[in-house]
Each structure stands twice: as structure tokens, then as C-alpha cells.
Amino acid sequence: MSSITPVNAGVQVRGSENLLRNRQIRTVALLFTGYAAYYFCRSDLSVAMPLLIEELQRHGMSSHDAVIRVGQIASFGVLAYAIGKLFLTGLGDIWGGRRSFTIGLGGALAFTLLFASGGSWPLFTMAWIGNRLTQSIGWAGSVKVCSKWFDYSSYGTVIGILSLSYLVGDAAARQAMGRLIHLGYGWRALFCFAAIVAGFFLIANLLFLRESRTELGYTEPQVNPLNLFAGSGSKPKRFRELLKPLLFSRAFAVVCLLSLGCTVVRETFNTWTAVYLRDFFQYSASSAASTSAIFPAVGAASVFMSGWISDRLGATGRSIVMFFGLGATALALIALTSLRAGASTSMWPLLLIGVVAFCLLGPYSYLAGAFALDFGGSQAGAASSGLIDGVGYLGGVVAGDSIARLSIAFGWRGVFVALTGVTALSALAAGYLYLYQRGLRRVEA
């Protein structure tokens, strides 16, 4: 009997490991599809912008005023999103990531339906603010759940996979909504369709998503031993306890500034690509909506590759990838300034938009994901993610109203010149982060 016992024990261990792996896969699948559904309730405004501008023009508003008005709606929404990131996402560390994730998805559903029922600019604005404010806690909630299911050695890969969700969701939403426009549906139908998708995946997550693997009897996952809370044995109970170590970290401040620069560029392309293709290259509304999916679609490949590479380059790997990625993004933006307006026969605008997506979105995915967990660990992962994202979206506010005004005053070339400057400064910040991290590793050695 004694010779059989170790074999049986080994089988049980392997069986337990396989079961845990299956549970982890299911957790990622639920978070992935759920967060993709968030983007159906976010991309709908961008896709519907040309239609909303046309409707405002039919009601007597000039073309320039209509563009600025929808740009203001977008900016108010991004501001609400930033405020939520800064002040609400830490709740995930107090009440759990699952609750934050499902509340965010439920709020997106409700406010999307409110937007669809509206007929005036004030109601549109209020509904979009409510949508983005409730959505603000969703990503930090998903990051918090991941910290309770996975060891730190796999953060880059897992968060990279999860980061694909908003790119896949964005691309799928734009393709599907572009098809609806082609079939003759109006902008209200787009918002109702987004709400239906969100409702389906909200139910799935309410039924099957679990907060942590310890609920099923497994051990706590390993966290990064260098996280800012490594010396604390107790769970922080107040926001001050969550924020203090983060706010006094120089490296964390640099990551927040990187988030600001990257988010300005990302939100500009997310918000205005369809309008840019229609106005500058004479795409139809349906074609511009569908083709704008190239930005998130190409970025998806970058996110997965960047996550996988960063786990293999060590502690400074993420900052290295960010430096080279942002440098290449700046070059692609310079190339966009050289394009001339004309018919939609040239492939250059799509190619360069794809290059921007590939070089930007992979490094961007580190910021409020793997970097957030590196700094916050399992104790303050949600707060860390929220602060990084919140600072970023404060910068992203300019992607609405300010970009609208910039495009009217200086044209799209002026927009891309401004974005080039932002990206170049961000690349320098990434280089500084690499040197700073390398210095810390030498001191520790």
C-alpha cells in the first residue's frame, strides 16, 4: 500500500492542477467576453458620430458647431471616466473585483438604453457621462480578479490576453454596427444593439464568475515580491492606506505620465477615426464605421505579443518595449501628416493607422494591467490600476472637444503634428523609466 500512495497523491496533485487551470481559463473567458461587451457600449458613440452630426445639421446646426457639440459629449464622458478611475476604482480592493466588474457592465447597459431614448443634447450628455462613469470601475475590477487567480510570473501574458478583450470588442462592435448602418438602421438601433450584447454577458458573469481561487479551496496566488505593499501583512481598509505607497513612488508617477500621453493618442483614434476617414478621404458613413475597426483589430496582435515578450525580458522588459513602440508610433504619426485629402482609393491611411495601433496599443496595455499589479500586488491592484488609468484619461479628455477644435482650426495634419509631440515625449519618459528600473536592480544586487 505504501508504494501506491505516492502515485495516487501525484495523480491527485495533477488532477487538482488541471482543475485549477480549467477554472483559470474559464475566469479569463468570462472577463474577456464581459469586457468586450463594455466596448459595444463605448464604441457606439464613435461609430454613430457621423450620423449624429448629420442629425444635428438637419436641426439647423452648422457643420462646425455639430462637430464641436458631439466632441463635447465625448470629452465630458472621458472626464467622467477619469474621475471614476481616480476615485471609484479603489472600491474593488475593498468590496472585491467581481462586484466592480458586474456593476460597471450593468451601468453601461442602463445608460446606453437611456442614450438611445434621448432626443436632446443635455440628455445625450447626461447619459454618456453616466455610461462612462459606471464603466470606469470595470477594468480595475477585472485586474483585481486576475490578481486573485494568477501568480505574478504570468501577469504579462494573462493581462495581455485580457487586454485583447477591449480591442476585439471594439473591432467587433464597429464591424457589426457598420453592417447595421449599411442595412439602413439609424443610430438608435446601434445603441440598442450594444445594450443587448452587454445584457447577455452581464448575466453570464453574474452566474459563473468567482472572486478568487481561494473560494474553491486553492492556495493564494504568488504576488510580485517587489510590489509596494510587500511588507504589509494586512489588507488595507482605508483608501489612504492604499494610496500613500503609490503616490510616493517615483516610478509609479512616471507610469501615470506615460498613461496620460498614450491615452491622448489612443482616445483620439478611437473617437475620430471614422470621422477622419469620411471627411478627409470621402468614405461613406457605413464604410468609415467598418474600416475604423482596423485600429483595435491590428492592436490586438500587438497586445498579445507585447504581453508575452514582457514576461520573458524580466523586470525592465516592459519599459524597453514601451520606448521602442512609442518611438515607432511617433514616426507613423509624422507620416500621417504628409497624406493629402482625396478619394478612398489609397491604402496609405489605413496602413499608417494600423502601424500606429500596432506600435501603441501593445505598450499601452501594460500600464493599467501588468504595471498596476507589479506596483499594487493583490492588495491594491485595483487602486493602482485606477490611478494609472485615471491620470491617463484626464489627458484623454482633450481627445474630444480639443481635437475637434484643433481639426477645424488646423486640419487633420495639425492634429497629427500635436499627437507626434505627445508621443515623442512619452517615448522619452519610457526611456527614463527603463534607466530608473535598471538602477534599482543594480542597487538591489
Image (cartoon, rainbow, N blue to C red):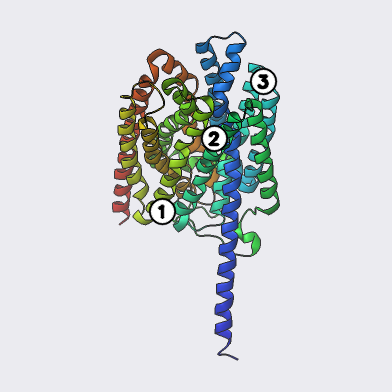
Q: Which residue is mark 1?
A: 308
Q: Looking at the image, which residue is at 36% across and 25% down?
A: 416
Q: Would you identify the image quadrant in which residue 423 lies?
A: top left
Q: Around disc 3, counting alpha carbons within 10 Å, would you say few (fewer than 14), some (14 to 19), or many (20 or more)?
A: some
- x, y (%) of residue 323? 32, 41
Number of numbered discs visible in the structure rendering: 3
Percent coordinates x, y for residue 98 in the rendering: 64, 48
Describe the element under mark 2 as helix, strand or loop. helix
The x and y percentages for residue 364 are: 42, 40
Per the image, label 1 sits on a secondary structure element best described as helix
| Crowding at mark 1 (Cα within 10 Å: few <14, some 14-19, many 20+) | some
Reading the image, the residue beneath label 3 is 123
Q: Amino acid at mark 1?
A: Trp
Q: Is residue 63 above or below residue 384?
A: above
- Is 305 placed left or right of 125 in the picture? left
Task: Point out the tag, 3 or 2, that comes first from the N-terminus.
Answer: 3
Secondary-structure class at tag 3: helix
Q: Give me the C-alpha separation between circle 3 and circle 1.
A: 43 Å
Residue type highlighted by circle 2: Arg
* Residue 219 visible from this viewpoint: no
